[in-house]
Image: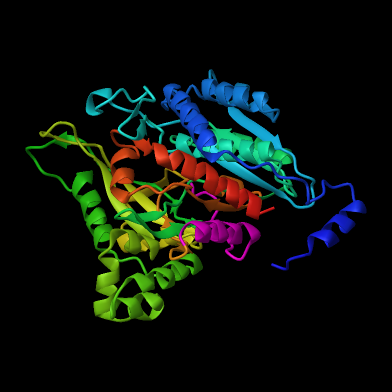
Amino acid sequence: MIRIPRALLVTACLLCSFTPLSAQTKPVAWDTLARESQTILADYLRINTTNPPGNEFLAARFLKGILDREGIEAQILDTAELGPNRANLYARLRGNGAKRAIALVHHMDVVPATPSSWSIDPFSGAMKDGYIWGRGAIDMKGTGIAQLMAMIAIKRSGVPRTRDIVYIGNSDEELTSTGGLVFVSRHPDLLKDVEYLLTEGADNRVENGKVVYFAVGVAEKRTFWQRLTVNGVPSHGSRPTKENPVPRLVAALYKISQYETPLHVTPGVDKFFRDIARLYPEPQRGRLANVTAALNDPQSREWILSDVWWNAFLRNTISLTGLAGSNKTNVIPGVATADIDVRLLPDQDPAAFLETLKVVVGDTAVHFTTLLQPKTPLESPINTDLFHAIERAAHDREPSAFVTTPMETAATDRPTYRRLGITTYGFSPFLIPRPEIQRGMHGNDERLSVDNVGYGVHFLYDILRYAQ
Ligand SMILES: [Zn+2]
């Protein structure tokens, strides 16, 4: 970045109608803002947006109320398209228009919680033992509030804005993503000036209270679920026949289970392994520093693929998950089906993969049906203003930590927005130890530390400021 002397900037701005970049910025009272953000998050967690049915309209109204009070224009959208008590939320804080906008996106719905498995009411928003408890604290109402309060802090403090900041709350991410899909298809006009978008899709790595790395998700696997069907002739189980569809299906599934998908290193994954190499001693360090070469060496390959995450970063994966034949032991069924969870690397051709799978099975009696079409491929560029802003804000906090780019193996709403050409990143502003993510996210006793709330607001505030 070239630093321009302030005097020059002021002179330049006399010639244009933009807010001068030298405008006075008011200091932020971070402790007060953190407490305010904690209270708002607790209130947000009390709104039960379990999906199904969602009821995100209540959440949208809650967020709009806060935005209205701050004088930030906000709209509740898509109520007719999304169905009863559902909605998307959209807000925009204007900049001077010199650069394109940044969008902060979260989903307002949460997955179901089983209260009997929790040590506290999952919709209490209780503050206890240094945590704010509730379904959605991590996934992802906590991030939604950190985004909201960072945007509000930018406005209150009068940080000069060259970019608009767009704030979006979507419905239904946890089930079928209709919120994001409807928003993108109905409101491309609201997104046409958006250059960057931040939402979920990567977690910072913290160990023993220390940041190992900050993570920006630039890529995600593409879900390509398949159902295999074999038809047969129903008959009595006491007299085995060749028309029993079950053994035929089982033979196909066995072949799939033995099939090893090719290994393939995508750019973001290559960077991820090069970045984390420094955390390991030799010979692991050398292997990770050049993962493509390491995958050609049997011993190195075995070590790398023994990590279930790394294995998923490096290939298309297939998990055999659902199976259905007869529901009576003495009846040969007329049909047998199996569902398989296929996840493709972002740069793979789904049709070609399906053809390969059919060759692997080698039985035309096995029919394939696509249950879920893959979303738009997601592999975002790294050399951007926003990525550099994240690096700078991360470095402010932990000079010894680095920013890297793990792949998301599950699915988010990012590809839906990527379709419009927006550079989308997965970014969490919090420092949450892995066991807490593992336990809380879609599990029980989901909670976010009180300290994380203020940390996340400040982190996002700095990123938004540096990206101007
Ligand atoms: Zn989520």
Name the residue at 67% across, 42% down.
165
**Left-right relation of 163 to 448:** right
Name the residue at 47% across, 34% down.
141
Measured along the vertical axis of the image, is residue 211 above or below residue 149? below
Name the residue at 36% across, 74% down.
288
**Left-right relation of 280 to 346:** left
Q: Determine the image quadrant of residue 246.
A: top left
Work out whether residue 317 or residue 265 is closer to the camera in this orientation and state it. 265
Work out whether residue 160 or residue 419 is closer to the camera in this orientation and state it. 160
| Residue 340 place in picture, x, y as percent | 33, 48
Q: Which scheme is used to colour this image of the protein? A: rainbow
Assign the N terminus to one quadrant of the image. bottom right
Name the residue at 82% across, 49% down.
20
**Left-right relation of 374 to 97:** left
Q: Is residue 213 magenta?
A: no
The residue stretch that appears in magenta: 373-398
Measured along the vertical axis of the image, is residue 393 above or below residue 305? above
| Residue 245 place in picture, x, y as percent | 23, 45
Identify the residue at the far top of this view: 84
| Residue 259 place in picture, x, y as percent | 29, 64
Q: How many marks?
A: 0
Q: Is residue 362 visible?
A: no
Identify the residue at the far right of this view: 15
Q: Is residue 439 visible?
A: yes
| Residue 433 place in picture, x, y as percent | 33, 49
Q: Is residue 380 magenta?
A: yes
Work out whether residue 201 or residue 175 is closer to the camera in this orientation and state it. 201
Q: Determine the image quadrant of residue 192.
A: top right
**Left-right relation of 24 to 227:** right
Measured along the vertical axis of the image, is residue 49 above or below residue 291? above
